[in-house]
């Protein structure tokens, strides 16, 4: 499916938001969260620029699965490091092992369900962390209510990841055309929620 001019504009705006978050949106944090968030939004920015240049064909690359793992893992690690100090080391270990497991199962020839199970576990834990932590801390009054938008962004990134996963397996829950049609808007909304949540939360 050819990318329309509107799709490219939406992705360009999303790229600018991701770049803003890297440059401005993560000030006043400790070193580890800054590194984690910079990696997450940096990878997102590169992926978006590749989409603009290569079009939707970029989504066909096997690297997409690995890249789509880096973003939620890095974001969730940053959140854990900021807000759940006792879990820092254990979650850092999970992040490293989870990423290595995804890379290994995607690069090694496997005919079983192990790669799917691995990515489901890694994405599931990271996604739930991004979705629940900001909302729970907002409800508990430990952060400003707007921080819950990060959780909304987490839900959207989970939805986007799910759609891409089904697309890659050849068993999409909706048609490929529909997935590609909604993806630019979904990416923009997701990134806008992250930027607003981190800025005003």
Image (tube, rainbow, N blue to C red):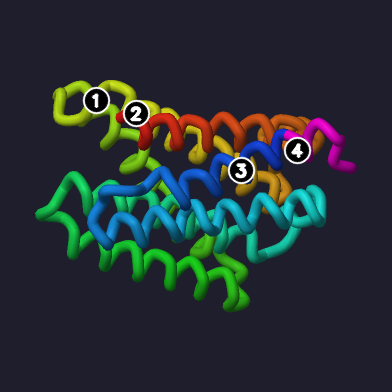
Residue that carries the numbered disc 2 in the rendered image: 200
Residue that carries the numbered disc 3 in the rendered image: 16
Q: Would you call the spot at circle 2 few (<14 residues within 10 Å), some (14-19), or many (20 or more)?
A: some
Alpha carbon separation for disc pair 2 and 1: 7 Å
- Helix, strand or loop status at disc 4: helix
- Choose mark 3 or mark 4, whichever is in front: 3
- Left or right: residue 162 compared with residue 3: left
Per the rendered image, the range of residues in magenta is 1-9
Q: Would you call the spot at circle 3 few (<14 residues within 10 Å), some (14-19), or many (20 or more)?
A: some
Question: Residue 45: x and y, percent?
Answer: 59, 53
Residue sitting nearer the eye, 93 or 54: 54
Residue that carries the numbered disc 1 in the rendered image: 144
Q: Give the residue furthest to the left.
A: 86
| Pointer 2 or 1: first along the chain | 1
Q: Give the residue furthest to the bottom.
A: 108
Alpha carbon separation for disc pair 2 and 3: 18 Å
Circle number at residue 180 = 4
């Amino acid at each position: 499916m050819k990318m329309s001019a509107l799709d490219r504009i939406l992705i360009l705006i999303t790229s600018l938001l991701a770049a803003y978050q890297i440059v401005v949106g993560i000030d006043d944090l400790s070193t580890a969260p800054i590194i984690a968030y910079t990696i997450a939004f940096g990878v997102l920015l590169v992926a978006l620029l590749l989409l603009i240049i290569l079009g939707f064909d970029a989504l066909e690359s096997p690297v997409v699965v690995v890249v789509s793992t880096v973003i939620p893992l890095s974001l969730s690690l940053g959140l854990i490091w900021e807000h759940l100090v006792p879990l820092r080391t254990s979650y850092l270990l999970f992040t490293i092992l989870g990423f290595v497991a995804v890379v290994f199962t995607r690069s090694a020839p496997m005919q079983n369900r192990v790669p799917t199970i691995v990515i489901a576990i890694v994405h599931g834990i990271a996604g739930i962390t991004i979705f629940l932590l900001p909302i729970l801390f907002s409800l508990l009054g430990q952060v400003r209510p707007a921080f819950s938008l990060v959780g909304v962004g987490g839900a959207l990134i989970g939805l986007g990841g799910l759609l891409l996963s089904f697309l890659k397996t050849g068993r999409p829950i909706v048609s490929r055309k529909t997935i590609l049609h909604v993806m630019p808007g979904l990416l923009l909304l997701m990134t806008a929620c992250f930027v607003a949540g981190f800025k005003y939360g």
